[in-house]
Image (spheres, helix red, strand yellow):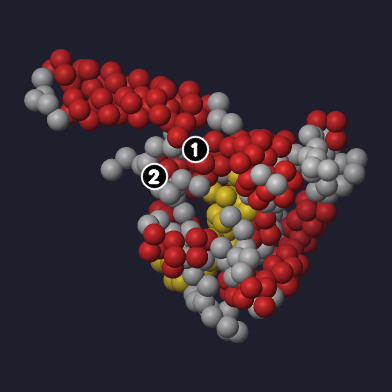
Amino acid sequence: MPPELLEFEEPVGVLLKEIEALSMLPQTPERMRSIDTLRKRAEEIRSELYTNLTPWQRVLVARHNSRPNTLDYIQRLFTGFSELHGDRRFADDHAIICGFAEYRGQPVAVMGHQKGGDTKQKIYRNFGYARPEGYRKALRVLQMAQKFGRPVVVFIDTPAAYPGVESEERGVAEAIALNLREMMMIEVPIIVIVCGEGGSGGALGIAIGDRVFMQEFSVYSVIPPEGCAAILWRDSNRKVEAAAALKITAQDMTALGLVDGIIPEPPGGAHNDHERASALVDQALSHALAEVSALSVDERLNLRYDKFRRMGEEGSAFIDKDNIETLSAPR
């Protein structure tokens, strides 16, 4: 079954409906040629659309229900995955997956956010909103990875950390802050891949690494566009404008020096071809892991520290103040 079409893919949808109608008729050589022509045209239009996506359209792609998630990548790229549960303090957070596996024969630790696909899974996974116990579970696995000398691979896909009262009561800010400090000092290689939404501190809580990559149509931001618009302009309907001003696309983040590279996606986005998307992630991951693993521990930690310390530094090559649009709150 083809993935659900997004609002800007309507021209493709018209062609797909025509293909479906022709497919239900008796198949003749002429009709089959027509179907092939329509399919090629649909792919051409999809490629054109995805070449010129606006920031808001990229947000929609990053949130697509069929976009491959942490478990999808674990299934395709890793073997012998054994999931670990619980933070040994309160509970197991189903919004964050953690465990150990093998990657190309090398033992590694794997973790990432999990949003869920259908309604039942989304509720079970809390829509990818992690609670404090999720970040503490991740830290427990990180410390185990260091103890056993296993590199860590992280997949980021969350709107934000869970903002509910119980999350605050159990210290979500402290849990994220502790992870930021501890991940900076973990001695094993850490590779981070933003594969969907990288939302606020909820993403950053497990996103400190030696290499941070974004998939081509993923987004990474301090706040979702709707929340930004609601705060700045008291109007969440200005989310399209907010998405453009926030500089949240992979291209924006690379230009600002906040991520290390972009992982290409198949035509029409990762949700359109899970196998090809996984192969592209595999290619980037294997190269980065080999590169970072070749460094000594001291070199790795110093480079990791310098990488994040330079972000936002005045006069740094990461920031070109003349080319950054500023947001203005209503007076």
Q: Secondary structure at mark 2?
A: helix
- How packed is label 2: few (under 14 Cα within 10 Å), some, or many (20 or more)? some
- Where residue 304 appears, as percent x and y from the top left, is 75, 56
The residue at 90%/44% (across/down) is 314
Of 125 and 110, nearer the camera is 125
Question: Which one is earlier in the sequence, the residue at label 1 or at label 2?
Answer: 1
Compared with residue 177, is residue 92 higher up or lower down, i.e. above or below? below
Q: Is residue 9 left or right of residue 172?
A: left
Q: Who's the residue at 13% across and 17% down the image?
A: 29
327 over 205 or under it: above or below: above
Q: Quadrant of the N terminus?
A: top left
Assess disc 1: are there few (<14), some (14-19) or many (≥20) residues with their C-alpha within 10 Å of its C-alpha.
Answer: many
> Most extreme residue toward the top, as rendered?
30
Q: Which amino acid type is shown beneath numbered disc 2?
A: Glu
Residue at left offset 55%, top offset 30%: 53
Looking at the image, is 178 positioned above or below residue 221?
Answer: below
Q: Amino acid at mark 1?
A: Glu
Q: Position of residue 90 (x, y in %)?
A: 58, 83
Judge by depth and name the residue closer to the eye, 269 or 118. Answer: 118
- Observer able to see residue 4: yes
Identify the image quadrant of the C terminus: top right
Q: Position of residue 161 (x, y in %)?
A: 62, 63
Residue 145, image quadrant: bottom right
* Residue bearing mark 1: 265
The residue at which mark 2 appears reads as 275
